[in-house]
Image (cartoon, rainbow, N blue to C red):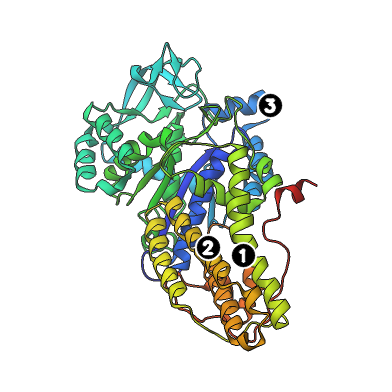
Amino acid sequence: MSDTGKSFYLTTPIYYVNDAPHIGHAYTTVAGDLLTRWHRQRGESVWFLTGTDEHGQKVMRTAEANSTPPQQWCDRLVEEEWKPVWRHLEIANDDFIRTTEARHTQRVQKFLQGLMEQGYIYEGKYEGPYCVGCEEFKLPGDLIEGNCKIHSKPVEMLSETNWFFKLSEFAAPLLEHYRKNPDSCQPESARNEVIAFLEGGVSDLSVSRSTFDWGVRVPWDERQVVYVWFDALLNYATAVGLTDDPSSQGGKFFERTWPADVHLVGKDILRFHAVIWPAMLMAAKLALPKKVFAHGWLLVGGEKMSKSKLTGIAPSDITDHFGVDAFRYYFMRAIPFGSDGSFSWEDMAARYTSELANDFGNLASRLAAMVEKYCGGILPNPAQDDELASALSKTVSSADEAIVALDFQGGINAIMDFCKVVNGYVTIQQPWVVAKDVSKKSELDAILYNTAESLRALAVLLHPVMPLATSKLWSYLGAESCLGPITSQKIADVATWGQLKGGSKVIKGEILFPRLADLES
């Protein structure tokens, strides 16, 4: 991270460690990875945070059911399940925060103490329904016949003397904030939900629990632990130095990083992030996140994927068959980010075959085979097809505009449309026919160079989506030796034509996306 200037700071939710991650968790995390990789390739300083939420009744009860102390349970799941899955999926996060770490718990206590001293915390009695699965105090409208709408399980009735946060004082300021800054909560459906909730009246929030002890201790009341969501939401700020002295290393880091540019969240936790969290920040006189983006649910059989309902699919169930890149591509390409989407093996297989194996992978294989056959594996000298160059320029502009706006589907569509244009160019030019006429050697060379240069651009544009396959392609094109690592290529420079050097060695390499029949044999 640079020493000066604001970094692009993106967070995923921190995930409960009551079980291993499923593809719903991976969906959010891959989206964050794609966006931060793209911003890095725009030349920006970036900080990407993910992590785990390890306190609360849900984790405690799961650990007890497995006859394991909560800390030991969390340690095992984080090190044996969560971190390995993110590595497997090529998630390039800069930090991984755990809410049981001292750097988090100490800052939570300091933050809460500050709110207490400013008069925003008071003692009171909470009576009402609570869903352990959501770790949420419920309102009557949140229930169906006494059951949580999300978990389809009965809620528990609580009666406790707790510490409360004056959340109600911030309803009006929050409404004003969202009306003045509509982009700060997206998509529009999410913002409308938040505004309607705020207009309906907001009660003060119990921020402590007294009936169990797995959590951060309330600094002035050792009998109580901090409510898990109050604790968890602070991770976005504690991980970058919240409450540290401004002159310290942590304080300077906070200054360069905060506020978050994007909080990615599932729509089921929107209220926490768009009501409670900004109210906490307002109380502490801290800048609010620039954007909270609530994506939709991944559906299986018409229901949200869930560990508690045992409908979750492990990422490896899919990557073992299709590979990591295809996994990343499919979920970012097939489902509009912000809407619900259904996963089906049939749709994934169809897109894999049509878009990855046939359109992209086959183009790379054909180019390498033709350069080897007609040019001895040596890339011809630069040439330019004006229509291809113009199409690429438009593609870069469209893809950048879409992806920066979190329209991952739109961005990928723009890139893959260019891939189709290049395939059409090869089909029309028929280099295999041109090669039969020795007098047309320069024409053949131009066709092959233009195709290779188009693949160079596709490799860079698709790298944030599919880092493994594009890195291989970059190497096969001989681009590494003349242009440097693919990660150092800038989005703004992609459309500059003629970057590949004539005389570079082009190799066939392995097929980027083998046919599914070959994978199954």
Residue to which mark 1 is pinned: 363
Q: CA distance from mark 1 to mark 3?
A: 51 Å
Could you tell me if the residues under marks 1 and 2 are in contact, i.e. CB atoms within 8 Å? Answer: yes
Q: In x, y percent, where is residue 309?
A: 58, 24
Numbered label attached to residue 190: none
Q: Could you tell me the amino acid type at mark 1?
A: Leu
- Foreground tag (2 vs 3): 2
Q: Nearer the viewer, residue 125 or 511?
A: 511
Identify the residue at horizontal 38%, vertical 31% (top origin): 207
Residue to which mark 2 is pinned: 419
Q: In x, y percent, where is residue 360?
A: 59, 60
Q: Is residue 312 left or right of residue 38?
A: right
Identify the residue at horizontal 23%, vertical 48% (top origin): 181
Residue to which mark 3 is pinned: 66
Q: In x, y percent, where is residue 432?
A: 66, 73
Q: Could you tell me the amino acid type at mark 2?
A: Cys
Q: Is residue 215 left or right of residue 82?
A: left
Q: CA distance from mark 1 to mark 2?
A: 8 Å
Q: Nearer the viewer, residue 293 or 473?
A: 473
Eyeballing the image, is 231 above or below 12? above
N-term-proximal mark, 1 vs 2: 1
Quadrant housing residue 473: bottom right
Quadrant housing residue 346: top right
Residue that extends furthest to the right in the rendered view of this protein: 521
What crowding class fits label 3: few (fewer than 14 Cα within 10 Å), some (14-19), or many (20 or more)? few
Q: Secondary structure at mark 2?
A: helix
N-term-proximal mark, 1 vs 3: 3
The number of discs equals 3
Could you tell me if the residues under marks 1 and 3 are in contact, i.e. CB atoms within 8 Å? Answer: no
Q: Could you tell me the amino acid type at mark 3?
A: Asn
